[in-house]
Amino acid sequence: MTKTINILISDPLSEDGIYPLLEEKDLQLNIVSNTGLSPEELKAIINDFDVLLVRSQTKVTREIIEAATNLKLIGRAGVGVDNIDLDAATEKGIIVVNAPDGNTNSAAEHTTAMIMALARHIPHAHMSLQEGRWDRKKFVGVELKNKTIGVLGFGRIGQEVAHRAKGNRMNVIAYDPFLTAEKAEKAGVAYGSVEDVAKVADFITMHTPLLDSTHHMINDDIFAIMKDGVRIVNCARGGIIDEDALFRAIESGKVAGAALDVMEEEPFVGNRLLDLPQIIATPHLGASTIEAQESVAVDVSNDILSYFKHGTVLNP
Ligand code: NAD
Ligand code: MLT
């Protein structure tokens, strides 16, 4: 008798993207969508499932993994796996798969939109109009042309953002531990250390994962060597920037503005940074397009099927 594979989807996923699972004929799948569970609720039911499929909201902690005696695979419909305790999963032999490039374009486009919105005060100018003011002097912006943008993390999204910045006639300087002179030359960018980037950039945009080595990589010391009036963009992960240091750097006038899609604690409603007029923010929308959500869900669904049919995955 064919064994049923029980799949729990615990974050909202694109229905159009999970069609490989919905249309599967060879395997017997039982797909349960149960979103918005508290950690206690998830812990109470996780034992019933072979697969857990998440976005970034569900925190797959050691406690959840240890309670999951039947779990074989955790699928992450997106890039960052910082919401999953990888050590705990590895210790229990649970495979973790992600969708590394399905949302690259959307995240790069969102970053580019944030850079432009920041340079031209678009959210604040819009709000001012809605409040009945015709305030043209207050919202004088800066051009991107001939400015230098520092790209920290020159992976998939960092490279796409750099490409678009060059289209806006910006100079690009990147830092990535794996960036070589040859690769930088091919991409048409300068490269250097974090400090080199901090010293010359007019805009600095983050595109690293959140790791021990990137936690608070932008801190008081790095802000201190930045140019006065620098603008900061973070559409990667909260925690890469020390938020208290950012607050101080904005208050002192060192940082002219910051555009944030992510913060250390999410949801970040009520974060004191949001009260500063120099901040613009979006609620973790980098990958929130119809195309990206469909694409990451398709990729991770196909990996689940591949694992149960052939014992192999594309994106471990
Ligand atoms: P990627 O793996 O392709 O690139 C990350 C790059 O960071 C790699 O080139 C790596 O070498 C580099 N890196 C690692 N440690 C570093 C360090 N200490 N200093 C500088 N660079 C370092 O990943 P990606 O797809 O480009 O995604 C980048 C980040 O964006 C991830 O954190 C991801 O979760 C996040 N992301 C956010 C959204 C969103 O909705 N806001 C959407 C997609 C991705
Ligand atoms: C990611 O890492 O892919 C993003 O944060 C997008 C998401 O929330 O899935």
Image (spheres, rainbow, N blue to C red):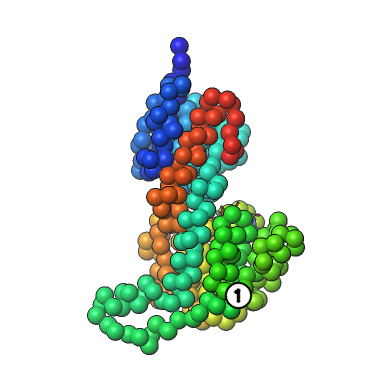
Of all residues, the one furthest to the bottom in this rendering is 137
**Residue at 52%, 53% in the rendered image:** 104
- Front-lying residue, 86 or 107: 107
Of all residues, the one furthest to the right in this rendering is 181
* Quadrant containing the N terminus in the rendered view: top left
> Is residue 242 depicted above or below 135 in this figure?
above
Figure label count = 1
**Residue at 38%, 85% in the rendered image:** 138
- Front-lying residue, 197 or 159: 159
**Residue at 36%, 75% in the rendered image:** 124
Tell me if I can see residue 59 in this picture: no
Of all residues, the one furthest to the left in this rendering is 132
Q: Tell me which amino acid carries mark 1.
A: Thr
The local crowd at label 1, few if under 14, some if 14 to 19, many if 20 or more residues have their Cα within 10 Å, is many
Can you give x and y, in whole percent of width and height, for residue 42 in the image? 40, 36
> Is residue 50 depicted above or below 276 in this figure?
above
Q: In which image quadrant can residue 182 be found? A: bottom right
Can you give x and y, in whole percent of width and height, for residue 202 in the image? 58, 76
> Is residue 174 depicted above or below 92 in this figure?
below
Residue under numbered circle 1: 148
Mark 1 CB lies closer than 8 A to ligand 1: no
SS for callout 1: strand
* Quadrant containing the C terminus in the rendered view: top right
- Front-lying residue, 191 or 12: 191
Of all residues, the one furthest to the top in this rendering is 1
Can you give x and y, in whole percent of width and height, for residue 262 in the image? 47, 59
Q: In which image quadrant can residue 201 be found? A: bottom right
**Residue at 37%, 31% in the rendered image:** 32
Tell me if I can see residue 180 in this picture: yes
Can you give x and y, in whole percent of width and height, for residue 266 in the image? 43, 55
